Each structure stands twice: as structure tokens, then as C-alpha cells.
């Protein structure tokens, strides 16, 4: 994923609380970098419930245009 795509994905997850229109591979990469946590039991759903980790919140805030 490109940097802009990561920021957009984090923004969607922060606003909706779900990984809407984000591929499984992209979710795995976000989890690998400890930017998100996927709800237990929701890993196989089409749009799983997700929350940002502290690292993800910091990255989103740092890359948000004021």
C-alpha cells in the first residue's frame, strides 16, 4: 500500500469503525504494522469491525490536514 492509501484506510476505519472497501491483504499489512486491531471472530467477514491502535491514531493525526 502507498502512504496515501494507508492514511485513507485509517480515516475510514476511524470514522466508520469497520474496514469498508479495504482488501484482506491490505488489512493484514495494517495489522502487521500494528496500526489496527480487528475484532475477534470478525476476521473472515467482508467488512470486519476494526479499531485503530495508539500507533494508528498517531499516524492518522500526524497525516491529517488541519
Image: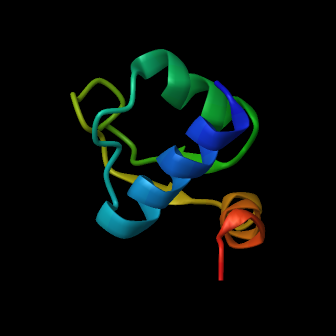
Q: Farthest residue in the top direction?
A: 25
Q: Is residue 46 left or right of residue 58?
A: left
Residue at the image position 40 percent from the left and 55 percent from the top: 12
Residue at the image position 63 percent from the left and 36 percent from the top: 31
Residue at the image position 76 percent from the left and 60 percent from the top: 55
Give the percent coordinates (x, y) of residue 35: 67, 49
Q: Is residue 36 left or right of residue 19?
A: right
Q: Farthest residue in the bottom direction?
A: 66
Residue at the image position 71 percent from the left and 30 percent from the top: 32
Give the percent coordinates (x, y) of residue 15: 37, 68
Q: Is residue 15 left or right of residue 4?
A: left
Q: Is residue 37 depicted above or below 2 in this figure?
A: below
Give the percent coordinates (x, y) of residue 40: 39, 43
Image coloring type: rainbow
Q: Is residue 23 depicted above or below 62 in this figure?
A: above
The C terminus lies in quadrant: bottom right
Q: Is residue 50 depicted above or below 40 in this figure?
A: below
User: In the image shown, does 64 or 38 lie closer to the viewer?
Assistant: 64
Quarter assignment of residue 21: top left
Q: Is residue 48 left or right of residue 9?
A: left
Q: Farthest residue in the left direction?
A: 46
Q: Is residue 25 depicted above or below 29 in this figure?
A: above
Give the percent coordinates (x, y) of residue 29: 64, 26
Number of residue marks: 0
The N terminus lies in quadrant: top right
Amino acid at each position: 500500500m502507498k502512504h496515501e492509501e494507508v492514511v485513507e484506510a485509517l480515516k475510514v476505519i476511524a470514522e466508520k469503525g469497520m474496514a469498508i472497501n479495504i482488501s484482506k491483504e491490505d488489512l493484514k499489512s495494517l495489522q502487521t504494522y500494528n496500526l489496527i486491531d480487528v475484532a475477534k471472530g470478525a476476521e473472515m467477514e467482508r467488512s470486519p469491525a476494526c479499531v485503530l491502535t495508539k500507533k494508528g491514531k498517531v499516524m492518522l493525526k500526524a497525516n491529517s490536514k488541519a
